[in-house]
């Protein structure tokens, strides 16, 4: 079993946002290393944890073995796109809170070996679910120039999308692009280094979103989640870039217009300076809360 190291972002705020009540049921739709689920359990909640990463599932099943035996925690492998089906199969048809944390975990960035990080030289992969068909290697080496431009603009909001896509196509004509280092170097030649963000950051983000179909998965997962909530149940969502946050904001506003409930957070909650100092990955986190009527 691999050690699934991950520092949960906005831990106290997210669990407080769920209004956990002892004996009530909650879903952690992005289980990861079990940090958020662990605090919900400490507060007396009963949890269904979902994750598509088998390494995360195995880690939590081992670290929370006693909770699982006591039936306080149920863990299942799956994509939260199927949250309604998974909840029904596990007896969580109606719950008092659901948490989504869309961030890539520290483990996936640093230890998974799947090419999520620009800081490590690994083979291009970026699959959250290692059994999925499409990989970053496929995207980079088989997508047309126009398709690459489209995803770089749409999912990365990258200003140099055309130039980077052209450079990728030129490079792969000579030899297949296989590693994160090769892709990073292409981006560095096109874009000037910025103190705040590496030139490859938005490209890596765009490819990861494409590989995992993240935006459509978010839309379906959050839409289905609100239907699982009991009256006064809460939906807590943590996102990490403007595209995700925009989708969540729009979904919450739609739920409100439909008369399903109220938006608790007029503006997204963010990590304080202390948390950002201790965990730099929390600096881009934004949390929104919706309460069902």
Image: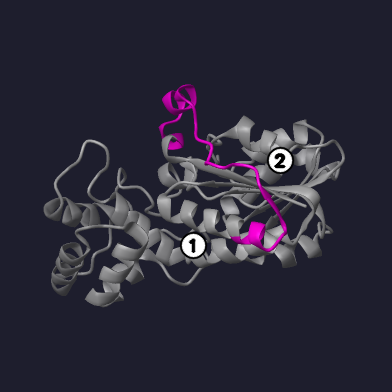
C-alpha gap between disc 1 and disc 2: 24 Å
How many C-alpha atoms fall within 10 Å of the one at disc 1: few (<14), some, or many (≥20)?
some
Mark number for residue 18? Answer: 2
Quarter of the figure with residue 94: bottom right
Check residue 273 for magenta coloring. yes
Q: Nearer the viewer, residue 208 or 225?
A: 225
Identified at 82% across, 42% down, the residue is 72
> What secondary structure is marked by label 2?
loop
Q: Nearer the viewer, residue 254 or 176?
A: 254
Mark number for residue 214? Answer: 1
Identified at 65% across, 38% down, the residue is 36
In the displayed structure, does residue 145 sit left or right of residue 88?
A: left
Q: Mark 2 or mark 1, which is nearer the start of the sequence? A: 2
Residue 136 x/y as whole percent: 36, 64
Residue 78 shows in this picture: no
Q: How many marks?
A: 2
Q: How is the image coloured?
A: one colour
| First to last magenta residue range | 254-282
Return the residue found at the far top: 274
């Amino acid at each position: 079993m691999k050690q699934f190291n991950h520092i949960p972002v906005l831990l106290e705020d997210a669990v407080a946002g769920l209004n956990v009540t002892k004996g009530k049921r909650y879903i952690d739709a992005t289980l990861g290393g079990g940090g958020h689920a662990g605090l919900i359990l400490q507060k007396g909640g009963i949890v269904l944890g979902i994750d598509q990463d088998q390494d995360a599932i195995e880690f939590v099943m081992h670290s929370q073995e006693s909770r699982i035996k006591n039936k306080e925690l149920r863990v299942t492998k799956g994509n939260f796109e199927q949250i309604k089906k998974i909840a029904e199969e596990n007896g969580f048809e109606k719950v008092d809170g659901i948490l989504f944390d869309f961030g890539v975990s520290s483990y996936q960035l640093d230890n998974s070996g799947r090419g999520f990080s620009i800081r490590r030289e690994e083979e291009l992969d970026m699959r959250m679910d290692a059994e999925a068909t499409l990989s970053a290697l496929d995207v980079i080496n088989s997508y047309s120039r126009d398709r690459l431009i489209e995803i770089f603009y749409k999912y990365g909001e990258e200003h140099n999308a055309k130039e980077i896509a052209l450079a990728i196509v030129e490079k792969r004509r000579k030899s297949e692009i296989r590693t994160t280092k090769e892709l990073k170097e292409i981006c560095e030649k096109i874009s000037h280094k910025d103190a705040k963000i590496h030139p490859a950051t938005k490209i890596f983000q765009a490819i990861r979103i494409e590989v995992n179909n993240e935006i459509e998965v978010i839309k379906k997962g959050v839409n289905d989640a609100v239907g699982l909530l009991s009256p006064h149940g809460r939906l807590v969502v943590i996102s990490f870039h403007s595209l995700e946050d925009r989708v969540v904001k729009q979904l919450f506003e739609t739920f409100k217009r439909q008369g399903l409930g109220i938006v608790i957070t007029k503006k997204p909650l963010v990590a304080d300076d202390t948390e950002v100092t201790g965990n730099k990955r929390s600096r881009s986190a934004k949390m929104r809360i919706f309460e069902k009527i």
